[in-house]
């Protein structure tokens, strides 16, 4: 029986030819690593090739919106210039530099970007401010740019809640990163159809 909570019955989408970026914060590394692995596993299972998956990091979740924006804009410049570029170059180069960077990777703009972070509530208001800013920032980037940005931000009250949602707890909860990988493929495919 399909559970009430969650995205309903599983849909199958062919990710062949899609190019997807995963950008993740480095805070709360154990949980992050499992979520990134789960997302990547689903991308590969849907037919996205290893060379079409770019993984990049930022220090904390607060940096996710600018990271997504830069990665996507740079990949668009690269695509229009007919060039390839490495993930670290994408984040470190200016737009002008990117036009002359040597080719190392596939040449199309990203079809979807998964932003992954784990915010754990502390004793101050930090959590609320960052969660609000990142949520709005990611939505703004996806609507301004038109590229699907998958919301992989866990906002949990305890470390245990984060571990559970990364499939590392004792309750048997699944790894939410897998859902995000599937969502990226679905949105990448549907976005092409909606053009
Ligand atoms: C500062 C901070 C704190 C307190 N907690 C987290 C967290 O739980 N998860 C996370 O991803 N990042 C955290 N950060 C770092 C901020 O996101 C950001 O990197 C710094 O404030 C620098 O802009």
Image (cartoon, rainbow, N blue to C red):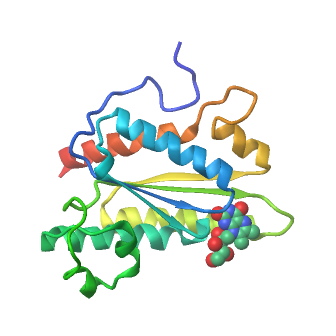
Q: Residue at x 33, y 85 (%)?
A: 94
Residue 108 appears in the picture as rendered: yes
Relative to 21, is 58 above or below? below
Residue 129 appears in the picture as rendered: no
Q: Residue at x 78, y 51 (%)?
A: 157
Ligand 1 placement by image quarter? bottom right
Residue situated in front as seen by the camera: 31 or 149? 31
Left or right of 101 in this view: 165: right
Q: Position of residue 24 (x, y in %)?
A: 53, 59
Considering every residue shown, the one lying at the far right of the view is: 123
Left or right of 65 in this view: 117: right
Res 169 → quadrant: top right
Considering every residue shown, the one lying at the far top of the view is: 1
Q: Position of residue 8 (x, y in %)?
A: 47, 26
Res 116 → quadrant: bottom right
Q: Residue at x 44, y 43 (%)?
A: 40
Q: Residue at x 21, y 67 (%)?
A: 84
Left or right of 175 in this view: 147: left
Left or right of 179 in this view: 4: right
Q: Position of residue 180 (x, y in %)?
A: 47, 43
């Amino acid at each position: 029986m399909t559970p009430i909570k969650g995205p309903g019955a599983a849909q199958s989408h062919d990710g062949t030819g899609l190019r997807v970026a995963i950008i993740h914060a480095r805070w709360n590394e154990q949980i992050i690593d499992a979520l990134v692995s789960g997302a990547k596993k689903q991308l590969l299972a849907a037919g996205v090739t290893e060379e079409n998956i770019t993984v990049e990091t930022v220090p904390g979740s607060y940096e996710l919106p600018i990271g997504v924006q830069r990665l996507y804009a740079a990949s668009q410049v690269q695509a229009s210039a007919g060039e390839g570029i490495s993930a670290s170059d994408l984040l470190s180069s200016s737009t002008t530099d990117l036009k002359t960077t040597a080719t190392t990777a596939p040449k199309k703009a990203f079809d979807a970007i998964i932003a992954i972070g784990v915010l754990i509530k502390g004793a101050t208001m930090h959590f609320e401010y960052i969660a609000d800013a990142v949520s709005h920032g990611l939505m703004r980037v996806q609507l301004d740019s038109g590229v699907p940005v998958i919301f992989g931000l866990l906002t949990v009250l305890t470390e245990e809640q984060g571990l559970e949602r990364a499939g590392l707890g004792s309750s048997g909860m699944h790894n939410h990163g897998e859902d995000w990988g599937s969502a990226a493929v679905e949105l990448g495919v549907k976005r092409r159809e909606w053009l």
